[in-house]
Image (cartoon, helix red, strand yellow):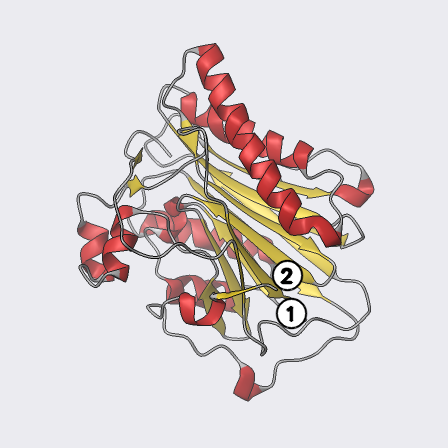
């Protein structure tokens, strides 16, 4: 992300969201059977067509293997979800003059270090605390290097046990593709999203709004961040898509779904998604990571339980129940 993105605060009378959202019993909250999860993952990031460098970044790591985080890939990677889980992150930097690139790098580095000893019974606490600490790290680097005002979004996915935890700061997105349906697991923390939620703008109007690049919070801009967490019980063949707004801006949810479902591999899907975003007029940096879950024995989703959601359906009715 380059200088077109800004962060600000807008007063709202909306009630605060619960600290952790979990779906009610049903297709989103039925865990897999006992066999361990296998996850195939692929990620790709490119600079925007008119940009000299890429301020986006992604991270993929399997803590059980003790290997360094992956930031570039040439082919999909198959990983087993063990006790310490698999972590995926997408960060979209902002601030200009390389500041955005620094911010996204700091965010993902701090995320990796902070989550390196996570366990399933502490996933929520670890994610929240790590992201809050990463926010402080960005502030410290900005102050020390004279890059005040730099910041970054963060969307992180932790696959651990038989659940996926999604954390969000800003407007990078996470989606669940299940069968032939797609569900946005995050909600953009942006001014136009607030207007959409309040009925003041349609999604079509929001895309043309002069405030379309104003986000309500980002990593490194304020001393505190409000980490929004979502939990989903994963199913066999679930696919998780994380992306920056360089992808979700030019492409609609149905367009992304069509490409993911029709593609023969995760790498092909990522390349086709990026190509479609550029062809659709996208000029921003683009990052996309796809992860597909597999297990030898797992609950399958019956046709009547498949997600049949319009892309404009609010997330809240599905994911507004706090975990007890």
Q: Residue at x 32, y 52 (%)?
A: 250
**x and y percentages locating residue 98 in the rendered image:** 42, 20
**Looking at the image, residue 181 lies above or below residue 142:** below
Q: Which residue is drawn at 38% across and 25% down?
A: 52
Give the labeled residue for mark 1: 237
Q: Residue 104 carries which label?
A: none
In this rendering, the answer to whether 76 lies above or below 138 is below
Q: Residue 292 carries which label?
A: 2
The front one of 273 and 151 is 151
Q: Which residue is drawn at 35% across and 61% down?
A: 252
Q: Position of residue 312 (x, y in %)?
A: 32, 68
278 or 312, which lies in front?
312
Does residue 76 appear in the picture of this structure?
Answer: no
> In the image, is 92 to the left or to the right of 216?
right
**Contact, mark 2 vs mark 1 (Cβ under 8 Å):** yes
Reading the chain from its start, which is encountered first: label 2 or label 1? Answer: 1
Local secondary structure at mark 2: strand
């Amino acid at each position: 992300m380059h200088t077109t993105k800004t962060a600000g605060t807008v007063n709202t009378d909306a009630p605060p969201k619960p600290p952790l959202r979990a779906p009610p019993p049903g297709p989103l909250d039925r865990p897999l059977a006992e066999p361990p999860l296998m996850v195939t993952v692929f990620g790709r990031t490119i600079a925007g067509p008119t940009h000299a460098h890429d301020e986006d970044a992604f991270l993929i790591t399997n803590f059980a293997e003790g290997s360094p985080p992956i930031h570039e890939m040439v082919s999909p990677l198959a990983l087993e979800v063990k006790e310490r889980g698999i972590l995926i992150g997408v960060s979209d930097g902002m601030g200009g003059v390389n500041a955005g690139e620094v911010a996204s790098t700091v965010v993902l580095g701090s995320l990796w270090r902070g989550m390196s000893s996570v366990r399933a019974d502490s996933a929520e606490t670890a994610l929240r605390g790590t992201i809050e600490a990463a926010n402080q790290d960005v502030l410290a680097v900005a102050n020390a290097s004279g890059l005040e005002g730099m910041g970054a979004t963060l969307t992180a996915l932790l696959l651990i046990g038989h659940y996926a935890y999604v954390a969000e700061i800003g407007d990078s997105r996470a989606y669940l593709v299940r069968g032939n349906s797609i569900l946005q697991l995050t909600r953009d923390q942006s001014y136009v999203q607030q207007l959409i939620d309040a009925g003041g703008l349609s999604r079509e109007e929001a895309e043309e709004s002069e405030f379309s690049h104003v986000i309500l919070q980002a990593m490194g801009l304020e001393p505190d961040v409000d980490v929004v967490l979502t939990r989903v019980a994963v199913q066999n063949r679930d696919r998780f898509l994380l992306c920056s707004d360089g992808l979700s801006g030019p492409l609609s949810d149905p367009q992304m779904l069509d490409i993911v479902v029709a593609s023969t591999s995760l790498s092909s899907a990522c390349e086709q998604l990026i190509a479609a975003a550029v062809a659709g007029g996208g000029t921003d940096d683009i990052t996309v990571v796809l992860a597909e879950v597999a297990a030898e024995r797992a609950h399958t989703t019956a046709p009547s339980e498949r997600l049949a959601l319009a892309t404009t359906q609010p997330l809240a009715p599905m994911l507004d129940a706090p975990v007890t």
